[in-house]
Amino acid sequence: MDCKKFEKLILRSFDGSIKDSEKRELDAHVQDCTLCSTAQEEYRIILDTLKEKDFPEPKPYFWERLQPKLKEKKEPEPITVWRQWGIRAIPVSLILVILFGTAIILFSPQEGMELSQSEALLLRNLDPLEETLAELEQKDFTVKSMELIFTADENNNGSNNNTRRY
Ligand SMILES: [Zn+2]
């Protein structure tokens, strides 16, 4: 017996697309063949569980609402396209900046930097104490000059008041 042929018939029998003669042939075979009878039983169980599963029906006007959205997606506005490109460009530029930074750190000679710093100190003859002292002196000078201005102004006002009084 050709069990493969009967397996196809079993599947067709579930769809109802089977001739009466074929149905009789199949029933006769299944009664004799345990292999095909178990196969028929398994197929029935599988199909029943599939039928039991309830697939949710789409909401009313689902297609009516979906189609304009699909059209929108097909023709994106140039602004949104540019925005998308911009969003994509941000990480790219960040990566480039990071790479550039690491390249500078890696390839710049540390010893050279130290030398240049000490050179700068030697050449400029920078004394932090001297600098602050100079700054303090300058501050003192500005305060003094401000005082002078204010006193002059006060005197001026006083004289003005005096002139007004008389
Ligand atoms: Zn069989």
Image (spheres, rainbow, N blue to C red):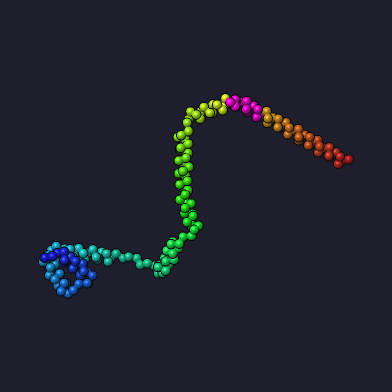
Q: At which x and y percent is residue 13?
A: 20, 70
Relative image position of residue 80 (x, y in whole percent): 48, 57
Residue 69 visible? The answer is no
Q: Look at the image and say whether residue 125 sits in the magenta stretch.
A: yes
Residue 158 lies in quadrant: top right
Above or below residue 145? Residue 65 is below
Residue at figure coordinates x 56%, y 28% from the top left: 120
Q: Is residue 63 visible?
A: yes
Query: Quick check: is 163 in the magenta stretch?
Result: no
Residue displayed at 72% across by 31% down: 144
Q: Residue at x 49, y 58 (%)?
A: 78
User: Which region is colored magenta?
Assistant: 123-136
The one of 96 and 163 positioned closer to us in this rendering: 96
The part of the image, by quadrant, that contains residue 161 is top right
Residue at the bottom extreme of this rendering: 20
Quadrant of the rendering where the N terminus is positioned: bottom left
Q: Residue at x 48, y 30 (%)?
A: 110
Give the left or right position of residue 78, taking residue 151 as reference.
left
- The reply, left or right, for residue 57 in relation to residue 121 is left
Q: Quadrant of the C terminus?
A: top right
Using the image, determine if residue 148 lies above or below residue 75. above
| Image position, residue 129 (x, y; %) | 61, 25
Identity of the residue furthest to the right in this view:
166
Q: x, y (%) of residue 155?
A: 81, 35
Count of labels in the image? 0
58 on left or right of 125: left
Q: Is residue 111 rendered to the left or right of residue 54?
A: right
Per the picture, the main secondary structure of the magenta-coloured stretch is helix
